[in-house]
Amino acid sequence: MEPIILGIESSCDDTSAAVLQGTKMLSNVIASQAVHIKYGGVIPELASRAHQQNIVPVIDTALREAGVTADDLDAIAFTRGPGLLGSLLVGVSFTKGLSLAKNIPMVEVNHLQGHILSHLIDLPEENLPHPKFPFLCLLVSGGHTQLVKVTSPLEFEIVGSTIDDAAGEAFDKCAKVMGLPYPGGPVIDRLAHEGDAEKFRFAKPSVDGFDYSFSGLKTSFLYFLRDRMEENPNFIEENKADLCASLQKTIIDILIKKLVKAAKALDINEIAIAGGVSANSGLREAIVEEGRRRHWKTYLPPLKFTTDNAAMIAVAGYYRYLNGEESDLGVAPVARLEELL
């Protein structure tokens, strides 16, 4: 019988708990935090307070929906990092308490690897296609943009990474400049469908190897708007859809170019995307189209697995549990990716 794993995710502003039996998802509960919207970004102190309020009812709901109790659990998988330290501390502390009370092993998970391994989750109602190893994953989230070669559920090689801003940050920061609500990425995606992606041209940074850079795009976009607004104060409002479409196309072009380069160099045609920005409709369409041209086998995560969720933490923890990995009560959360490597 496959082990039953409770996953706990609290790295940013979503409190989530999930129960998996093996790779089969039995429940996946997420409590989002609307408190940050009016501030145009996540406020760490508010996020950690909300996690404290949400974590008990979220875990209780996940267990009840899965039809199990804490006594049935074989392990607890938790996000150790990267993320907001205060938010992570809530999840790690709860995991320690439950582990100590019920004598359940703890398994730490790298949040970013969880996003990648969301492609290995099985759903009760349908069989999802899973990429074959090795596969190349374009990981795009609010804080990270990486190209990762995945050789097994336990073997990851970062072959390319952003040297400054991530793609998600570029979306959100440019959206803020245009006066769009937070989070800006989904708003830009929606408005892009109404605009002309060829109307404006923006800078595409040139970076060696498989690495990315989005800081220059963000800065050039800001100066572009400033200059146009001096000529016409209503420029943004009159061209909002075209600006969104052109900006989105630029970001997608940057992402796809390096993905193609890495896939050629590594001779890999199993291609996946993951992370919050993988919900972007333009990026999903571009990956599929590029896959047709280059004979890739492409894998898009279900939209419910693109944002932060505990099912991805549970499936990553499942493979680590099978590998005999276990964390002790002295484990501490870490905010930076480098501290996990």
Image: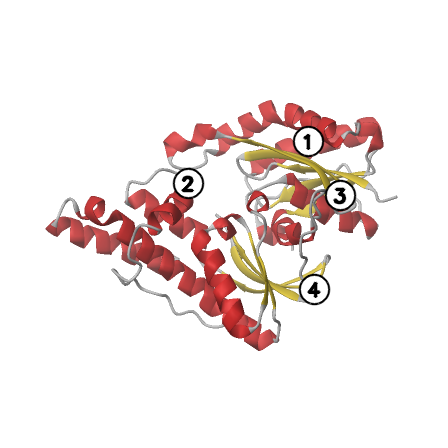
Q: Secondary structure at mark 4?
A: loop
Q: Using the image as rendered, state which of residue 131 and residue 84 is in the foreground.
A: 131
Q: Using the image as rendered, state which of residue 127 and residue 105 is in the foreground.
A: 127
Label 4 or label 2, whichever comes before in sequence order: 4
Q: How many marks?
A: 4
Query: Which mark is on residue 183?
Result: 2
**Left-right relation of 74 to 139:** right
Identify which amino acid the numbered label 3 is placed on: Val
Could you tell me residue 97's position as x and y percent? 75, 28
Query: Which mark is on residue 132?
Result: 4
| Structural distance between the alpha carbons of marks 4 and 2 | 33 Å
Q: Is residue 286 visible?
A: yes
Could you tell me residue 172's position as x and y percent? 39, 46
Q: Secondary structure at mark 3?
A: strand
Query: Which mark is on residue 107?
Result: 3
Mark 4 nearby-residue class (10 Å; few <14, some 14–19, many ≥20): some
Identify which amino acid the numbered label 4 is placed on: Lys
Identify which amino acid the numbered label 2 is placed on: Pro
| Structural distance between the alpha carbons of marks 1 and 3 | 13 Å
